[in-house]
């Protein structure tokens, strides 16, 4: 948890720029142009452009639409973390595996974990 001195030192402009950078990063990571994202999120390209460039503070409704269109969470925009969404995506993928495939993934993860621990 941030203390009040740290929070006070962060300007609104810096927060808006960082959120814009995260929107841009996520949009590019999923391979969408600003036009495609605008269409998918049902918001204007101008809103996306201004948000990405840190020129406009986005409303919560817009942030939710963007998060949904980019398959991420508001946590990612605010804090750079989207672990709940990532976990949910992994659960969806794992639930579609048969028992042999699941065992293979489980064994692979176990080996990776052991390699990291060593």
Image (cartoon, rainbow, N blue to C red):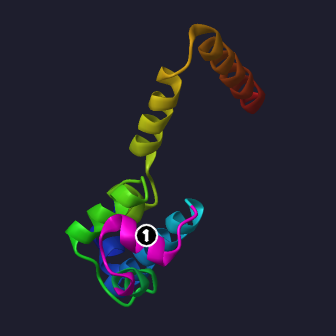
Q: Is residue 27 above or below residue 92?
A: below
In the foreground, 82 or 4: 82
Q: Quadrant of residue 41?
A: bottom left
Q: Is residue 36 magenta?
A: yes
- Check disc 1 and report its element: helix, strand or loop: helix
> Does residue 86 appear left or right of residue 62 in this picture?
right
> Does residue 69 appear left or right of residue 101 in this picture?
left
Furthest toward the bottom, the residue is 55
Residue highlighted by disc 1: 37
Q: Which residues are magenta?
A: 31-46
Residue 110 position within the rendered picture, expressed as x and y whole percent measured from the top left: 68, 20
Instruction: Count the marks.
Output: 1
> Does residue 13 appear left or right of residue 89 in this picture?
left
The residue at 30%/75% (across/down) is: 43
In the foreground, 111 or 44: 44
- Picture quarter with the N terminus: bottom left
The residue at 74%/21% (across/down) is: 111
The residue at 64%/16% (across/down) is: 101
């Amino acid at each position: 948890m941030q203390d009040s001195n740290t929070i006070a030192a962060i300007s609104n402009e810096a927060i808006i720029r960082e959120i814009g950078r995260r929107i841009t990063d996520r949009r590019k990571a999923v391979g969408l142009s600003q036009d495609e994202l605008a269409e998918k999120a049902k918001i204007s390209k101008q809103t996306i452009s201004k948000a990405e460039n840190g020129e406009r503070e986005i409303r919560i409704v817009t942030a939710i639409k963007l998060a949904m269109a980019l398959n991420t969470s508001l946590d990612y925009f605010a804090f750079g973390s989207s672990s709940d969404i990532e976990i949910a995506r992994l659960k969806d993928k794992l639930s579609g595996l048969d028992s042999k495939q699941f065992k293979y993934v489980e064994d692979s993860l176990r080996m990776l974990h052991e390699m990291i621990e060593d």
